[in-house]
Image: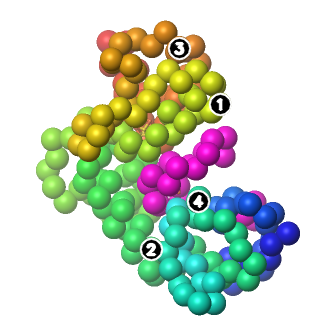
Amino acid sequence: MISFTINDREVTGQEGWTILEVAKWHGIDIPTLCYHGAVEPYGACRLCVVEVDDGQQRRLVASCLHPVQEGLKVQTDSERVKNVRRWILQMMVDEHPGSQRIKELAKSYGVKESRFKSDRVEDLCILCGLCVRACDEVVGARAISLGNRGVRKEVATTHRLPSPECVACGTCLYVCPTGAMEQLFDRIRG
Ligand code: SF4
Ligand code: FES
C-alpha cells in the first residue's frame, strides 16, 4: 500500500491506482467529465486537476492519470486548482452553452454563463471520447470513433453511415457526460 496525503488527510491506496481512484475510495470529491471507472482514463477534460507536491516541486496534474506515490501531498481544492477549473469551465460554457451539466458545474465554481452570444448552443460534445472508449472497452463493439482532426473532429461512425457493429445497447448514451449523445439520438429518431 502507498501512503500519502489528500488535503492534509492521511490516505492509502494500492500501487498503480491513480490519485482520483484513491480520492473516490476515501469519499473525497474531485469533479470529472471524461472519467468513468469502467474504462481507461483519457485525460481529455482536465477538470480533475489537482495540485501535487512530491517534496521537490509543486505542480498541477490530471488526477485521473497521475499514479499515487509514497509521501505525495495532494490538494484537491487549493486556490490554484480552483482557478484552473474556473478557466476550463469558462471555456466549456463559452463553447457548449447548451449543456446543462456543464452549466451546473460552472455555476458551482462561480462561472455564471457564456461571455459570448454563441451560435453553438446545439453543440454539446466536448470530444471527451468517453462514448467511444465505452463502446470499445465495455461493449466490445467499436461502433463509433473520434474522426477527423482539429475543428472538424467529431464522434462518428465509419463514413457517417449507420454502423453494422452497433448493438443498440445505449452504453454511449448512458456514459456521455454532457447530453451530446442523447441529442444525437433525438436527431436520428427525428
Ligand atoms: S458524445 Fe458525449 S461521451 Fe462522446 S465524446 Fe461527445 S461529450 Fe464525450
Ligand atoms: S476526468 Fe481527468 S481529465 Fe477528464
**Is-magenta flag for residue 87?**
no
Q: Say what amino acid the circle numbered 1 marks.
A: Val
Separation (CA) of disc 2 from disc 3: 41 Å
Q: Residue furthest right?
A: 1
Q: What stretch of residues is rendered in magenta?
A: 22-47
Q: Where residue 130 appears, x then y in whole percent? A: 51, 39
**Is-magenta flag for residue 45?**
yes
Separation (CA) of disc 1 from disc 4: 19 Å
SS at mark 4 in the image: loop
Separation (CA) of disc 2 from disc 4: 19 Å
Above or below — where is 48 with respect to 42? Answer: below
Q: Where residue 103 appears, x then y in whole percent? A: 37, 52
The numbered dot on residue 82 is: 2
Going from N to C along the chain, the mark reached first, 3 or 1, is 1
Going from N to C along the chain, the mark reached first, 2 or 4, is 4
SS at mark 1 in the image: helix
